[in-house]
Image: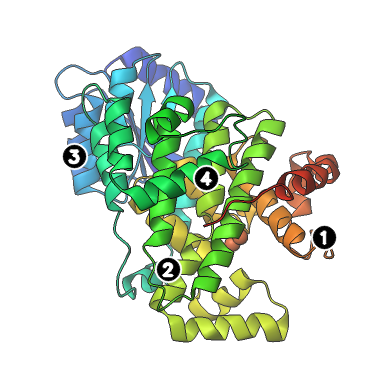
Amino acid sequence: MKKRILFVDDEPNILRGLQRMLRSMRREWDMRFAETGPEALEIMEREHFDVIVSDMRMPGMDGVQLLEEVKKKYPETVRIVLSGHSDSQMTMKAVRVAHQYISKPAEAEELKSKISRSCSLLSLLNSASLVKVVSGLEKLPTLPQVYQQVMEELQQEDPSIGKVGAVIARAPTMAAKVLQLVNSSFFGIPRHIESPVQAVNLLGLDTLKSLVLAVEVFSAFDPKKISARVLDRIWKHSVQTGTMARVLAQEEAFAKDGVDDAAMAGLLHDLGKLILMDNFSGAYKNVVSKVQETGFQVHEAENEIFGVSHAEVGAYLLGLWGLPQGIVEAVAFHHLPDQCPLDQASPLLAVHVANALSKSESKGRTEDLLTLGLDQACLKKIGLQDRIEQWMEIGHETLNTEEAEP
Ligand SMILES: [Fe+2]
Ligand SMILES: [Fe+2]
């Protein structure tokens, strides 16, 4: 089915430019164009859209206001911001309403790839089997509290690093865990970081915000339902995958945002396992025995039993919490990267490889990466198959100095 996309910009020239640039997509996309927020909302009342791409600065109703409305009325529509250079205050505000940003002037390729990736993620997350599992969840973990407070501070006109640091410091157990991570090889910072404020200063608000989220999410699970041993094992694997994804992203010269998203997605990639174990502990035992009996991979056994895997479940939740789309996508497809239009610098690539490397190291490098789920055909398609050997070396060096405790 054709995807339906609505573009909104107050400058008719830009709309015409987009129309010209995206002509080649006519077979796959149905595109509509609106010059104001109210006009966009009027069109949306009559027709359904999968994606809305909106300008930020518009007279009358601006992009944030428009996307807030869309979020309320049509939460299933993917919201993309097309924003002008260096408009940092606007961008800050857009954080809570947009799934994805594209900066102007946009290249045709970037637009096409970001929009089509949004569409594949959307169809995955709207699949009937996922909706069934998610609606059967007794409780969906809510957005953790300290993280929420950090987000609230970030949404102020002029967010203060000191205040964000203070919010974290007020939750001492969490602050300790965050600092432990910050000081581990997860970041590879040479000097010792003593306080949350120092950490925010050094790593930036975005990174700290995601760390808080990861640490808080892991501590929210009930040790009665998931044993401390299992929780500990998943946490270690997650920290390793996050560390490795960051190192790989740096090695492959990703942009700064890509590096941060890769690390965070690595840290959160198996979150769905915890959700499934917590909510369906009985059925999850069947997953475990299936893996032992058949040699299936975990995600394959989950698919047999639940019709979905931990990857989609985790991605669904992160999407609901409004995490950046690069992270949601990396989590959603971490076992099946070929199901998503992939490029050489996407967090998904880093997480997919890092996941296999972490498993390989934990098994003392006795199994080959293919059995551990590395999709070599997919790497070949984007011309990276020759890098595997070097990645393994780097993985061995990095993960064997890793000592982060949960
Ligand atoms: Fe996984
Ligand atoms: Fe994993």
Name the kind of residue labelled 2 in the image.
Ile
Between 283 and 201, the one lying in front of the other is 201
User: Are the residues tagged 3 and 2 within 8 Å (C-beta)?
Assistant: no
Q: Nearer the viewer, mark 1 or mark 2?
A: 1
Q: What's the amino acid at mark 4?
A: Leu
Q: Is mark 4 within 8 Å of ligand 2?
A: no
- Look at the image and name its color scheme: rainbow
Q: Nearer the viewer, mark 3 or mark 2?
A: 2
Q: CA distance from mark 1 to mark 2?
A: 29 Å
The residue beneath circle 1 is 365
N-term mark: 4 or 3: 3
Of tags 4 and 3, which is closer to the observer? Answer: 4
Mark with earlier residue (3, 1): 3
Query: Seen in the image, is 241 located left or right of residue 25?
Result: right
Q: CA distance from mark 4 to mark 1?
A: 25 Å
Image spot of residue 16 (x, y percent): 39, 18
Ligand 1 is within 8 Å of the C-beta of the residue at disc 2: no
Q: Secondary structure at mark 4?
A: helix
Quickly name the residue at label 4: 181
The answer to whether residue 98 is above or below residue 86 is: below
